[in-house]
Image (spheres, rainbow, N blue to C red):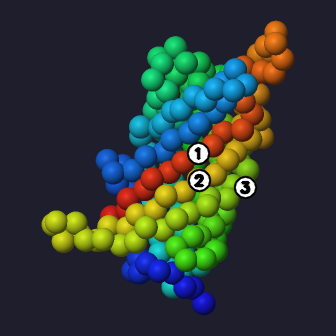
Amino acid sequence: MTTTTTTLPRTGTWVIDPSHSSIEFIAKHLVVSRVRGRFGAFSGSVEVADPIERSAVDVTIDAASIDTGDADRDGHLTSGEFLDVASFPAVTFRSTGAHHRDGDRWAIPGELTIRDVTQPVDLEVEYLGVFTDPWGNAKAAFTAVTEIDREAFGITWNQALETGGVLVGRTVKVELDVQLAQQ
């Protein structure tokens, strides 16, 4: 039995509103500092099912839309040493289920594909509820986080530091803030 403190969305198709959503990431740099970035272009949908645990999430990210606030770094990240957007223009996520944790917290397991390598990933989701905008449209919102091992996707470029450690951390934290519009 699903028990949440917030009303669940109605069954049907809900699409991501990219102007009110974000996909961001954080990676270690020089062992101790963090670099933040985001993807500016993405699309996706959530097919809400009955029962809710059979719902499906499908997201496609334009890998070339990466933005860390530094054009040189973004160029390196889109190159063959990292995302290789010339060969692999999209990053995709497809859910394989939905599991209620407690309250408004869910686990959404799925498959993340980067550079044509697919790995299992679990999104830890906080469902924020369903709302009606000023024009009478139903909206739903959630936040999600996960951590990935970039080397598991074949992204292994790095540089050793004279003082020990490496230039770029292996683990990347991904944070999502998503607003959905019911279709």
Looking at the rendered structure, which numbered label has been put on residue 174? 1
Question: Does 122 sit left or right of 144 as displayed?
Answer: right
Mark 3 against mark 2, which lies toward the viewer? Answer: 2
> What is the x, y in percent for residue 176?
50, 51
Q: CA distance from mark 3 to mark 2?
A: 14 Å
Query: Considering only order in the chain, which callout, 2 or 1, is on the residue closer to the N terminus?
Result: 2
Q: Amino acid at mark 1?
A: Val
Residue with the mark numbered 2: 145
> What is the x, y in percent for residue 94?
60, 58
The kind of secondary structure element at disc 2 is strand
> What is the x, y in percent for residue 178?
43, 56
Question: Does 51 sit left or right of 19 as displayed?
Answer: right
Residue with the mark numbered 3: 120
Q: Residue at x 46, y 62 (%)?
A: 142
Q: Which quadrant of the figure contains the N terminus? A: bottom right
Mark 3 is surrounded, within 10 Å at the Cα level, by few (under 14), some (14 to 19) or many (20 or more) other residues, namely: some
